[in-house]
């Protein structure tokens, strides 16, 4: 069973970056998201890769890794649980990923890609003017 797939609005409203959206804005953003299951050990994003999407953790646990080229090692620097988000910099700017994110356990995440997000942002920015 996919967590919060029947109620992804509740997850978005609890996510700091989207908490100020009203119900209609949240529903419009939910319509532009896709859900994925990542199995334990699977890489979701790789440091240095170019991408244009962000993710919101619906269920599970993800580990965050940074490769330090000068030291020649990769270290775990954090973890993300339900309600956490990552990739917002790549979504907004297209800049390369600053960390590698791997599923520590089977994890469900929502993805928001740049083009649908920009359409959403443009339509709601115009409505608020």
Image: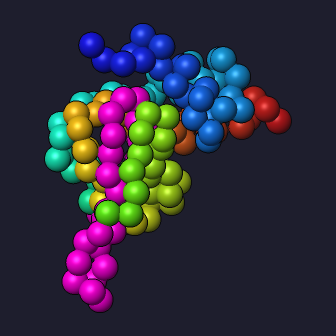
Q: Picture coordinates of residue 90 (x, y %)?
A: 45, 57
Q: Which residues are magenta?
A: 47-75
Residue at (29, 89) in percent of width and height: 70
Magenta span contains residue 74: yes
Q: Is residue 27 left or right of residue 1?
A: right
Q: Is residue 81 left or right of residue 76?
A: right
The residue lying furthest to the right in this view is 129
- Check the image and report above or below for 8 versus 117: above
The residue lying furthest to the bottom in this view is 70
- Check the image and report above or below for 59 versus 96: above
> Quarter of the image holding residue 18?
top right
- Check the image and report above or below for 84 versus 65: above
Q: Picture coordinates of residue 54 (x, y %)?
A: 43, 45
Residue at (40, 29) in percent of width and height: 58
Q: Is residue 122 left or right of residue 106?
A: right
* Residue 98 visible in the picture: yes
Magenta span contains residue 123: no
Color style of the picture: rainbow
Q: Nearer the viewer, residue 66 or 128?
A: 66
Q: Picture coordinates of residue 16 (x, y %)?
A: 62, 39
Task: Decide whether the magenta segment is chiefly helix, strand or loop.
Answer: strand
Q: Quadrant of the C terminus?
A: top right
């Amino acid at each position: 069973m996919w967590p919060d797939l029947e109620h992804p609005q509740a997850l978005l409203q609890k996510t700091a970056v989207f908490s100020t959206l009203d119900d209609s804005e949240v529903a419009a953003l939910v319509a532009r998201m896709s859900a994925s299951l990542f199995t334990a050990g699977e890489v979701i994003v790789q440091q240095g890769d170019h991408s244009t999407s962000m993710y919101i953790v619906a269920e599970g646990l993800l580990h965050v890794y940074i490769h330090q080229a000068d030291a020649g090692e990769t270290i775990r620097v954090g973890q993300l649980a339900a309600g956490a988000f990552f990739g917002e910099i790549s979504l907004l700017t297209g800049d390369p990923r600053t960390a590698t994110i791997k599923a520590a356990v089977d994890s469900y995440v929502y993805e928001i890609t740049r083009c649908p997000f920009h359409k959403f942002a443009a339509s709601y920015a115009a409505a608020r003017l």
